[in-house]
Image (cartoon, helix red, strand yellow):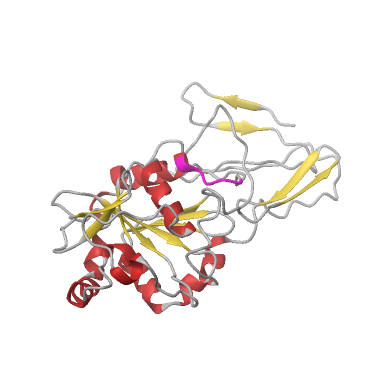
Amino acid sequence: MYQFDEDKENRFRTYSIRPSSVQRSQWAPNVPNDHDDSILVYLSDVDSPRAVYSSIDTTSCRLAWGGLRGPCCAEIVADVWDCNKARLWLETCASCHGDVCKQNTMMVAGMNLIDCENMVIVKAEEGLCWVALSYVWGADYQPSGSDLLGYREGSKLSATVPTTIRDAVHVTLQLGYRYLWIDEYCIDQSDETHRKEQIEKMDQIYQGASLTIVAAAGTDKAYGLPGVLTTRRKGRKVARIDDVILFSNGPDPCKVAERSKWFTRAWTFQESLLSRRLLVFTDYQMIFQCSTTSTKE
């Protein structure tokens, strides 16, 4: 369907495309912080003089060669979240974006964190990196049990935490972090003084987090992060015509996030503005945003 040649310097790639064929091309650079490729397209030996070539779809297709993989490469979205891609986004941001995305992490006085390895509340110490969660509790949420007693240093989280909380813990560990900040558990809801102090410092908490996980799907904390553990992503549409497979990765996840319950809440909207990096989970795929980059699976 195509021919592929590379010159000795590995700088130019050429493709021979037959009329009426569907090609998938990958425009992203192979090396983080590298310049974008320049694409030159020319047509020759067209059989039909009436053939019309009006556009090249750069949003939904790619052609993979030799396992090439970059931080912004377009791919068919899998049914489960791509941890390796999320790691690559984070590593690229940390190593290539310079001072724009760097920020001195200052410990917030009185802050508690979830130790995701032991599922216990610990006091934050100087030098720790943490991940924050931005989510909606849900209109029907009624505090009970430990929620009424409050979580404080040494408190153990229940094995039956809501699905979104469980998924956020899993993502935190898979990305190589250990500590997670979630308002419901890291602010002692039974201690009005601690609660007031920490709410006033939430801007510092989100600004200081290495990453904010965003649950932009569902309407409550029982929904989960689609594609992580048990919450399934909404299926993509696939059709076969002869030997050609046509697929759609679903609607633009950025627009999906903007229509979510999470986006409509002023509280969570502020959390997203304060955060230096966002990993947004929608029903269809992930989005990564920082001060320099906005990309999706």
Above or below, 145 against 233 in this view is: below
The x and y percentages for residue 51 are: 82, 49
- Left-right relation of 249 to 226: right
Q: Nearer the viewer, residue 93 or 38?
A: 93
Above or below, 185 against 87 in this view is: below
Q: Quadrant of the N terminus?
A: top right
The x and y percentages for residue 166 are: 44, 53
Above or below, 48 against 224 in this view is: above
Q: Residue 204: within the magenta?
A: no
Q: Which residues are magenta?
A: 79-83
Above or below, 130 against 37 in this view is: below
- The residue under the point 47% across, 71% down is 262
Instruction: State which quadrant residue 241 falls in.
Output: top right
Q: How many badges with numbers are in the image?
A: 0
- The residue under the point 62% across, 37% down is 63
The x and y percentages for residue 41 are: 63, 43
- Left-right relation of 185 to 238: left
Q: Residue 81: within the magenta?
A: yes
Considering every residue shown, the one lying at the far front of the view is 145
- Left-right relation of 243 to 42: right
| Majority secondary structure in the magenta region | loop
